[in-house]
Image (cartoon, coloured by chain):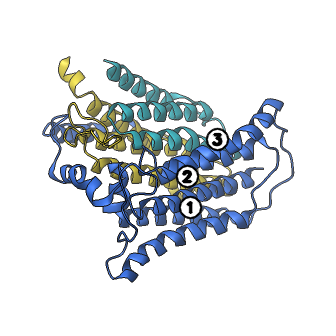
Amino acid sequence: MSILQANIYYIGSVGLMLVGLYIILAKRNLIKVIIGLSFFETGINLLLISIGYVRGGTAPIFSNPDVKAEGMVDPTPQALVLTAIVIGVAVLALALSLAVRLYEHYGTLDLRKVRELKW
Amino acid sequence: MAETLLVLAMLGVAICACVFRDLLSAVIASAVVSLIAAVLFFCLHAPDVAMAEASIGAALTTALFVIAIRKTTRFEEEEK
Amino acid sequence: MRGLIAVIVLAVLAAGLAFCLAEIPFGRDIGDVGGRYVEQGVQETGAANVVTSVVVGYRGFDTLGEVTVLFIAAMGLGAVLYGRRPSGGRREKPSLILSTGCRFLFPLIMVFGAYVFIHGHLTPGGGFQGGVIAASAFLLMYLGCGGKRIHRATLGAVESLAGLAFVIAGLAGLAVGGYFLMNVLPKGTVNQLFSAGIIPVIYIAIGLKVGSELAGIVENLLEVTE
């Protein structure tokens, strides 16, 4: 039980990635698939930040002059994930516009009925 | 202990979003997942990332989804 | 059948990830790169927020790429949804609470967003977070203030000029004789508003660009559905 509790962030982020990937692979509605894509990206961001955690660390901000530099968490994955979140919303906006256009053309969002996208 | 409960709640709500038939409920569930992820980012001492995830995931993504659902169908089709 | 194959793929992926993550113990010591950024970051860039100095200072070119990707996505959305007439005026009027609250809250949210992206080098926050907060103020206005719209040309002009300002700030470093995105303004003392050289200038440009871009995306998507 304690190994579950010590690595709870890894388990949570991998679990969220797997839920997102299951929605992408097994669901038929396009908006559901885009929701699954958003879950997948959130899971990956959570995994990256939890890898950069330092035990007993604080946030990497020098708010007053007597904050020590040792004992801060790693700032590099945080910069990476900031970029990844913004690009995630850009991809989502473009995917939703394609879904709206697809619905106007085919009249349905069911991926099995849309001919060119059969699995 | 608090983080364990939050992570289990996040996984539960994510599975709910997979199961719901009403797409509007699934979108609200995805907003709750983003909110819990923002709290987890704060627990991992990353305040910049927590602000970005809270504002983008819980506000803007949900608004875009609701606008897209309004133009297309609201309910998922039944399984054959 | 499809669900079964999906579960098998997921099981293989989960096993692979578990093997990889077993080698990385949770909460280990900071590495070499992160250690250098934390120890020398304030001295080399002058920003109190180390994540800001990494995003804009050490990896500023990647941030330029990210701004470009956001711009391409907005352009793609505009191209896919091109040439639609807003169909009819069949919209419900917003309720009294929503319209009153919207008129009251809109300037407050804009000021808060501007505060977040101006103080990006001192407190948690920065260009992207502040820009998204300003865009959510625009979203409130589209939903609650009943038919008011920002002039489309103004949004496009603000977005283009802000993006241009970022590139010009980078080229200023090249013009002085150094490298692209070199710090040409004085670093000042830490924890002051006018410090950290070129970082507040770039973050203000990014905040304005992201805010107007996301407001344009929301308006583009809304206009189709009316």
Instruction: Find numbered disc 3 in the image and state the secondary structure of the residue it sits on.
Output: helix
Q: Pointer 2 and pointer 1: residues touching (CB < 8 Å)?
A: yes
Query: Gap in Å between the C-alphas at discs 3 and 2?
Result: 21 Å
**Residue, disc 2:** C131
How many numbered tags mark residues here? Answer: 3
Furthest residue to the left? C23
Q: Colour of chain B?
A: cyan
Q: Which chain is yellow?
A: A
Q: Nearer the viewer, residue B72 or C1?
A: B72
On residue C209, the disc is 1
Q: Nearer the viewer, residue C225 or C104?
A: C104
Instruction: Find numbered disc 2 in the image and state the secondary structure of the residue it sits on.
Output: helix
Q: Quadrant of the N terminus of chain A?
A: top left
- Return the x and y of residue C65 as percentages of the image width and height: 41, 66
Query: Gap in Å between the C-alphas at discs 2 and 1?
Result: 7 Å
Describe residue C18's horizontal placement relative to residue C7 as left or right.
Answer: left
* Image height of C191 relative to C154, above or below: above
Residue depicted at x 71% and y 65%: C154
Query: Gap in Å between the C-alphas at discs 1 and 3?
Result: 24 Å
**Residue, disc 3:** B66
- Return the x and y of residue A42 as percentages of the image width and height: 41, 41
User: Looking at the picture, do discs 3 and 2 lie on one chain?
Assistant: no
Q: Which chain is blue?
A: C
User: Looking at the picture, do discs 2 and 1 lie on one chain?
Assistant: yes
Tell me the kind of residue under disc 2. Gly
Chain to which mark 3 belongs: B
